[in-house]
């Protein structure tokens, strides 16, 4: 329970947590040492010095007991005051004790005042304005006596110096530690940035550095990135090769079927056309999002071009909403293919498609909605898998396709570090497909 409560107040970044781990022990050590120094050493020494000074002051007061006038009293104690290096005078009838405020960091002054009050019953006031002088006001039978002497007779000189020195060197060493820690965390930050960029489909230069463990993690990331790139390349080459090699026999089949009577060749020609569509889909899937490098693109302008091309192809599609301005790092060809697939599915299973785009400082969302039958919630995960067909859920004699449309869209979204989300359209009642990409 306590750990769960503390977790809400813990910093999220590694640098902030490392700083907390570094600063917290230093602060605790300073507090413990300061308290131990004040209580175990400074208070004892101050108490001994205060008792010694109070005995000297009491001696001065005892010598004045037999005096009848103030001048006579001062004359009686003058030899003692000279030996003790003290200065004394009596306050006038209308004169009040001049009690000056002590320094805010003089944390030993309260103890001195308390001890003197206990040891000197006739004490009226104490003034400790600095570390050089101390002034005591004492009530006598001749009037209020002002007694001034060296502050060093009550406490050690500048008792705060040790704590100030500790704090100063703690700040210096903590600053040096912060600088060293930042240098140690920089390779981890670079590794995280390279991994995030690769997750969004960008390959940024990266060389391992830092401690042995960090370099090992960096080398492991480079090996993993190289393996993934090889696998993507091999998949692309394999599917492209298969698709390319099958085009030649299909062309020969079309050529042979063209020599047959039309009524006999029609069913076979339909099969050949379906195989051609299947190969085209394979080729699109094999290319995935690997075409081109990410560039700064205005998503709204790109969507307007895609929608204009779709309208020229006879699709009922419109751009209904554009929120936000700016650019995003995108692969235009891959995004075009993904949006065209969503629009194609929308007009295939519905009568029209509406497109909207929302650009914020953190994400880009491209939404395509239709008025078709939609996809049930329990089948949406299956719908984005390659070669998955949801007939008869969405197929209404409009052509079943090959089951790669949504898989290509999901692949493009993942290559940009995003995700494809399917839901029900609140405005049209059909399917709502969102491509969400982080910035």
Image (tube, helix red, strand yellow):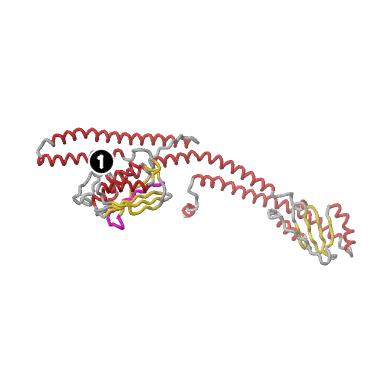
User: Magenta span covers which residues?
Assistant: 424-439
Report if residue 344 lies within the magenta region: no
Left or right: residue 166 versus residue 52 is: left
| Position of residue 160 measured from the top left corner of the image (x, y, whole percent) | 69, 50
**Observer-nearest residue: 193 or 52?**
193
Left or right: residue 380 versus residue 49 is: left
Q: Residue furthest bottom?
A: 94
**Observer-nearest residue: 226 or 145?**
226
**Observer-nearest residue: 354 or 213?**
354
Left or right: residue 379 versus residue 169 is: left
Q: Which residue is mark 1?
A: 281
Provide the secondary structure element on which disc 1 rests: helix
Tag 1: Cα neighbours inside 10 Å, few (<14), some, or many (≥20)?
some
Report if residue 435 lies within the magenta region: yes
| Position of residue 237 measured from the top left corner of the image (x, y, whole percent) | 29, 33
Residue 422: in sight, yes or no? no
- Counting every numbered tag in the picture gives 1
Left or right: residue 218 versus residue 67 is: left
Q: Please tell me whether residue 203 is drawn above or below residue 434 in the rendered image.
A: above
| Position of residue 320 measured from the top left corner of the image (x, y, whole percent) | 33, 54
Residue 270: in sight, yes or no? yes
Which quarter of the picture shows residue 73? bottom right
| Position of residue 255 measured from the top left corner of the image (x, y, whole percent) | 15, 34
Q: Residue at x 56, y 41 (%)?
A: 179
């Amino acid at each position: 329970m306590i750990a769960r409560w503390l977790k809400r107040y813990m910093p999220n970044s590694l640098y902030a947590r490392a700083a907390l781990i570094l600063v917290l022990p230093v602060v605790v050590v300073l507090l413990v040492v300061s308290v131990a120094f004040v209580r175990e050493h400074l208070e004892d020494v101050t108490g001994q010095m205060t008792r010694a000074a109070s005995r000297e002051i009491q001696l001065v007061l005892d010598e004045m007991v037999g005096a009848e006038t103030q001048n006579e009293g001062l004359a009686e104690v003058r030899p003692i005051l000279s030996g003790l290096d003290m200065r004394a005078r009596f306050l006038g009838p209308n004169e009040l004790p001049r009690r000056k405020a002590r320094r805010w960091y003089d944390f030993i002054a309260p103890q001195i005042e308390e001890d003197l009050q206990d040891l000197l019953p006739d004490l009226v006031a104490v003034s400790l304005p600095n570390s050089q002088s101390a002034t005591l006001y004492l009530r006598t039978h001749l009037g209020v006596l002002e007694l001034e002497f060296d502050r060093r007779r009550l406490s050690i000189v500048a008792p705060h110096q040790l704590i100030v020195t500790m704090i100063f060197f703690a700040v210096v060493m903590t600053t040096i530690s912060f600088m060293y820690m930042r240098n140690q965390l920089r390779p981890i930050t670079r590794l995280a940035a390279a991994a995030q960029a690769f997750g969004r489909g960008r390959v940024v230069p990266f060389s391992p550095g830092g401690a042995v463990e960090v370099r090992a993690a960096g080398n492991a990331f480079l090996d993993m990135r190289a393996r993934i790139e090889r696998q993507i390349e091999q998949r692309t080459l394999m599917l492209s090769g298969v698709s390319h090699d099958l085009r030649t026999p299909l062309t020969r089949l079309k050529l042979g079927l063209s020599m047959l009577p039309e009524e006999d060749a029609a069913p076979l020609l339909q099969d050949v056309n379906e195989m051609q569509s299947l190969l085209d889909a394979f080729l699109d899937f094999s290319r995935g999002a690997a075409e081109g490098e990410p560039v700064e693109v205005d998503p709204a302008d790109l969507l307007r071009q895609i929608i204009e091309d779709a309208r020229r192809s006879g699709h009922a599609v419109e751009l209904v909403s554009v929120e936000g301005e700016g650019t995003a790092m995108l692969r235009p060809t891959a995004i075009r293919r993904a949006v065209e697939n969503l629009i194609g599915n929308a007009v295939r299973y519905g009568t029209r498609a509406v497109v909207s785009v929302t650009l914020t400082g953190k994400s880009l969302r491209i939404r395509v909605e239709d008025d078709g039958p939609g996809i049930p919630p329990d089948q949406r995960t299956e719908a984005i898998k390659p070669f998955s067909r949801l007939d008869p859920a969405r197929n209404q004699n409009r052509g079943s396709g090959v089951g790669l449309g949504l898989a290509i869209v999901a692949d493009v979204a993942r290559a940009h570090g995003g995700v494809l989300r399917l839901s029900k359209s609140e405005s049209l009642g059909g399917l709502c497909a969102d491509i969400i990409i982080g910035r």
